[in-house]
Image (spheres, grey):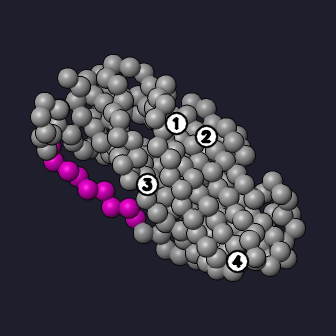
Amino acid sequence: MRKRIAKPAFVACALATTMASVVPAAGASAPRFNPGPSGVSITIATVNGSGCPSATAAVALSPSRDAFTITHRDYVAQVGGGSKAADSHKNCQINLKVHVPQGFTYRVSSVDHQLYASLQRGAEAIFRSSYYFQGSSNAKEFTHRLPGPYDGIWQFTDTDTEPTWKPCGEERNFNVKTELQVNEGTSDPTKVSLAAASATDNSIKTTYHLDWKTCP
């Protein structure tokens, strides 16, 4: 039986957003800049996976259009205490439709993850992620591990996430694939160990930072 997750007793720090001025890029490249251009929008096209049942994932664009966040309401992996075998591993794939104004392009430069973990001694949580534009075959993968005992917020960053810029003039959705796994290891099987990439109040989120530039 799934353990109900209490709201973590912490005060989430706001992610500071730096407003960067236009900086000339090397060579013939167009200048990169933030905030993003007016007219940007992001919506979820499709979502699949045991970690993101229907209507439990949401995306929101920052007011300065230099980042967006994804939140979940039912993305939890757990073992022990009567948990089912299928509870130990969850996954989610989100296909995002990003509307880019004509004459601009973007890339996702880094991703800040924020999860909650409650692990018994001997247990381990594993989080895997990859990102790529639709039609691309060079997805970059990241793996993060957290050993128990641990009880609190688990934060980490994927850097140089997508070095490729969206091809100018082409409609390419952006894909996000994640996996959340908890291994029982040598922990007490009567006690629950869990990791959650979700919270009912959206206090746990993933932030995707955007770089923008003009097309040639």
Determine the residue positioned at 63% across, 37% down.
47
Instruction: Identify the magenta region.
Output: 14-22
Q: Quadrant of residue 35?
A: top left
Q: Quadrant of residue 8?
A: bottom right
Q: Which mark is residue 175?
A: 1
Please name whichever residue, 207 or 150, is drawn nearer the observer in this view of the structure: 150
The answer to whether mark 1 and mark 4 are in CB contact below 8 A is no
Residue type beneath disc 3: Asp
On screen, 79 above or below 178? Answer: below
Image coords of residue 216 (percent x, y): 20, 23
Q: Which residue is mark 2?
A: 93
Regarding residue 124, the answer to whether it shows in the image is: yes
Image coords of residue 140 (percent x, y): 46, 43
Which one is earlier in the sequence, the residue at label 2 or at label 4?
Answer: 2
Of badges 2 and 4, nearer the viewer stands: 4
Q: Which mark is residue 122?
A: 4
- State left or right for residue 117 relative to residue 169: right
Which one is earlier in the sequence, the residue at label 3 or at label 2?
Answer: 2
Q: Which residue is mark 3?
A: 158
Which one is earlier in the sequence, the residue at label 1 or at label 4?
Answer: 4
